[in-house]
Image (cartoon, grey):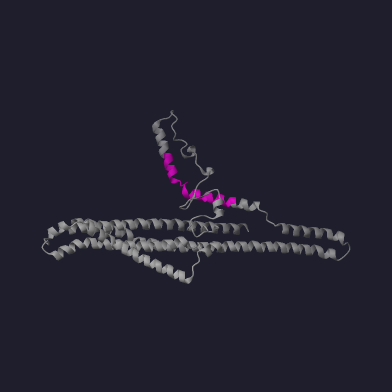
Amino acid sequence: GGYNIWGGSEEDDGRYMTRLVAALPSSKISRRGVGVTATADDATTPDEINPEGMDDGTGDKTQSDSNNNNNNNINSKKDPTLITTALATLEKDMALLDNLASLQPQLSGTEVGLLLGAVLASGIGPIAFPGTSVTEVLAPAAAAFTASITIGSEYIGRVALADAKEIAANSIQCAAEAEALLANAERVKAITPLCVGVCATSASFALLTPRLIEALNVGNSVATMTELYLLCPLVSVLSAAVADLALEETKGFANRAISVGVRRFSKSGNVGRTWLSSSEQIQRNSKAKTERWWSFAGSVLPAPIIGSILGGPSLSTKCIVIAALAAAQSAYFLAQAESVLARATDAVALKARSAAVSDTYANQGARNS
């Protein structure tokens, strides 16, 4: 499949740059995203960083340390790193784009032939038709014909500029939609660390439950003692279940944030390969919901089952094992949510950068028009 403004194909999740951006010498592609690096002209020499702080063996060491501190303070006030380097790189890319555009012919062969024909006709007319009224009309007609060619070229340029602006606007809209979906994913994921903390606290209190029962002198009441033993594992298992639900919601929003705009800017052949009918879409949604219920059951049942089998004959030991397993489950769900959210953040950042580059190139064309 071909590339588009988002990276082009259905399989790459929109994480590759366009060919135009990739062709620029300042852009480097990686699987995680795009990094803008400085060229050799942007490098700062050691003399520029610290021209006076180097000890040549003849000066005083105290004076050298003082110079080093002064130079470090001066350099700390400057910010020649990421933002400055990125702006300088973007300016170089714009200059390179102008140079590449200037190397291309501004007129086609047909336009050149028509203009030369108009000039030759207006010049040969008085010689070929002396003393006739044709000579009086031929030169103005050639001028009007030349003007019509110019107006036609202006029309083509304005249409191309309008197309570029519209594409840039659509890409910015897609980037905004992806940002909104990413914000929803981050909002849902925010509950997962809380679930991990609740699970860890419940597992810790499960260790203290036998001492608490002894302190309260409720060992003779079987019902009260059982309730105290089961309280911490119950809270821990419920927190793990909530973490799993948050993970599923985070995956949904993150996948939508990654895939938004991919089909919209893909070629027709790539879109046709992933086209689904109404019945196929219904079946896919039904399967996704069923998998969500199975995932919820898988987050609730393993800890009690394993704890009841491996916990031994003591109820307190079983409860401790169940609470600890639920805490481990919630931590695993948190790691998965962070991974999914990191992929979505990387893809959305690339979409926003591609939209900004597209708008910059469109504005560059408007400035040169």
Query: Does the magenta portion include 194?
Result: no
Residues in magenta, as a range: 70-96
For this view, does 61 lie left or right of residue 299? right
The percent position of residue 214, horizontal first and vertical second, equals 12, 58
**Residue 140, located in which quarter of the rendered image?**
bottom right
Could you say where residue 137 lies in the image, as x and y percent from the top left?
82, 65
Which residue is drawn at the image coordinates 55% and 62% (left, top)?
Answer: 269
Residue 281 in view of the camera? yes
Residue in the foreground of this view, choosing between 76 and 320: 320
Q: Is residue 164 left or right of residue 222?
A: right
Q: Tell me the quarter of the image containing the N terminus.
A: bottom right
Residue 71 drawn in magenta: yes
Q: What count of labels does the image hold?
A: 0
Q: Residue 61 in the image: state x and y as whole percent.
A: 39, 31
- Residue 53: x %, y % from top left: 44, 35
* Residue at left offset 36%, top offset 57%: 336
In the depicted view, which residue is nearer to us: 44 or 111? 111
Q: Residue furthest top?
A: 58
Q: Residue pushed farthest front?
A: 309
- Residue under the image location 38 percent in, 67 percent down: 289
Picture quadrant of residue 67:
top left
SS majority, magenta: helix
Q: Nearer the viewer, residue 346 or 292?
A: 292
Q: Is residue 202 visible?
A: no
Q: Is residue 161 left or right of residue 349?
A: right
In the picture as drawn, the residue positioned furthest to the right comes out as: 131
113 in relation to 280, above or below: above
Image quarter hosting the C terminus: bottom right
